[in-house]
Amino acid sequence: MNIVLATRNRKKVEEIGRIFRGYDVRFLPVDSFPGCPEVEEDGKTFRQNAVKKAVSIAQFTGCLAIADDSGLEVKALAGAPGVFSARYAGEGADDRKNLRKLLREMKGLEGAERQARFVCCIAIALPDGKVKTFTGHAEGEIGEKSRGYNGFGYDPVFYPAGHHRTFAEMSDAEKDSLSHRGKALKKLYIYLKKQFFNPR
């Protein structure tokens, strides 16, 4: 079985492929299909963006497709940056600029005012338009300065609940066990095994 991942990030393809090693499935990036459209993420929620991408790619390729959308929600900022997490500091902004803006917006906030969570929604779509979604959350708080060099995005300032190190200070395995994406992928894994796959 072929499953298309609505990403051009080959590291994501390899990561998911490792999770399903031993099963009769091959994960393909969208650039394996010439002419595959770039899907605009204009939804108001992570779920809307993930579903739109998965359905569009499934219909274009004729294969089962998986897409995700994720980001950071800060309680004191009314849920911002939310779906704009990747472009919080403007179109074309990089991780450093987004992080700098976040810390500037949160200057002076203390204690519970720094509560935040990461959210990931994964959508799986069939070519006929049928969709199922899986959501994962990672609760925590935002630190006052960056710590650590692993990960990406807002990882250097995010302390998961009950921990005194940021995601960027953790190993990949540690982060995966706590992260929003790791939790959503675990739900997807259980669903796909039950519905589609048999071990080789």
Image (cartoon, helix red, strand yellow):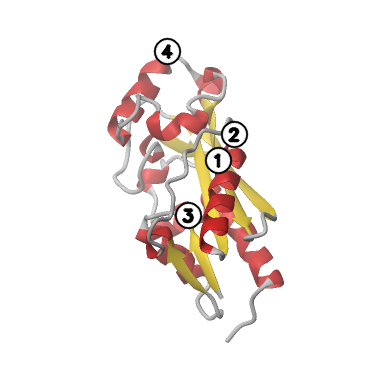
Label 3 sits on a secondary structure element that is loop
Determine which quarter of the picture holds residue 194: bottom right
Residue placed under numbered mark 3 in the picture: 6
Residue placed under numbered mark 1 in the picture: 49
Q: Quadrant of the N terminus?
A: bottom right
Residue placed under numbered mark 4 in the picture: 108
**At 67% from the left edge and 54% from the top edge, which residue is drawn?**
129
Tell me, yes or no, if residue 34 can be seen here: yes
Percent position of residue 93, x then y? 31, 30
Q: Nearer the viewer, residue 85 or 54?
A: 54
Mark found first going from the N terminus, 4 or 3: 3
Q: Nearer the viewer, mark 4 or mark 3?
A: 3
Would you say the residues marked 2 and 1 are in contact, meaning their CB atoms lie under 8 Å apart?
A: yes
Going by the numbered disc 1, the residue's amino acid type is Asn
Going by the numbered disc 4, the residue's amino acid type is Gly
Q: Looking at the image, is 199 positioned above or below residue 12?
A: below
> CA gap, disc 3 to disc 2?
17 Å
Percent position of residue 11, x then y? 36, 60
Going by the numbered disc 2, the residue's amino acid type is Thr
Going by the numbered disc 3, the residue's amino acid type is Ala
> CA gap, disc 4 to disc 1?
33 Å
